[in-house]
Image (cartoon, rainbow, N blue to C red):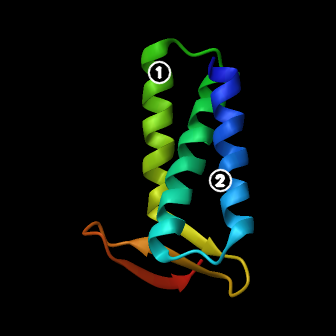
Amino acid sequence: MKKIIAPMLLVSATAITACQPLSPQDRSNLGLVGGAGAGLLLADAFDANPAWTVLATVGGAAIGTQVARNTQTGQCAYSNGDGTYYVAAC
C-alpha cells in the first residue's frame, strides 16, 4: 500500500502546481504533501518498521512546510512558526 500512496502524493502535488498560480497557503500545503511523500519514500527505501515510517513521514511533512523555494527569483519563504512567513535569499 505504501508503494502506491507515496508516488500518488508526489504526482498529485506536481499536478496541482501545473494547474494555477499558488497562494502562500497552497505552497505550504504543497510543501507538506511533498515532504510527507519524500519521508515515506525514504522510509520505504530503507525498509523501516512502521514506527520509523510514521516518524519519517511526519518529519518530512514538517520540513516541507518550513521552507518553500521560488525557483524564478532564487528566494525562499521561511516559516516564522506562527503561521506567517518571511522571504529571504536561499
User: Counting other residues with Cα less than 10 Å from the Cα at mark 2, is it few (<14), some (14-19), or many (20 or more)?
Assistant: some
Left or right of 52, for residue 90? right
Q: Quadrant of residue 90?
A: bottom right
Which residue is labeled 2 in the image? 13
Q: Is residue 77 above or below residue 1?
A: below
Marks 1 and 2 sit apart, C-alpha to C-alpha, by 23 Å
Q: Residue lying at the far left in this picture: please name it.
A: 82
Q: Quadrant of residue 3?
A: top right
Left or right of 83, for residue 24? right
Q: Residue at x 62, y 21 (%)?
A: 2
Residue 22: image x %, image y %? 58, 74
Q: Residue at x 48, y 84 (%)?
A: 87
User: Counting other residues with Cα less than 10 Å from the Cα at mark 1, is it few (<14), some (14-19), or many (20 or more)?
Assistant: some
In front here: 21 or 34? Answer: 21
| Residue type highlighted by circle 2 | Ala
**Label placed on residue 3:** none
In front here: 34 or 88? Answer: 34
Q: Residue at x 49, y 58 (%)?
A: 29
Residue 88: image x %, image y %? 51, 85
Residue 50: image x %, image y %? 47, 14
Which residue is labeled 1 in the image? 52
Q: SS for tag 1? A: helix
Q: Quadrant of residue 6?
A: top right
Q: SS for tag 2? A: helix
Q: Is residue 5 above or below residue 79?
A: above
In front here: 7 or 16? Answer: 16
Among numbered discs 1 and 2, the one appearing first in the sequence: 2
Q: Is residue 28 above or below residue 20?
A: above
Q: Residue lying at the far front in this picture: please name it.
A: 19
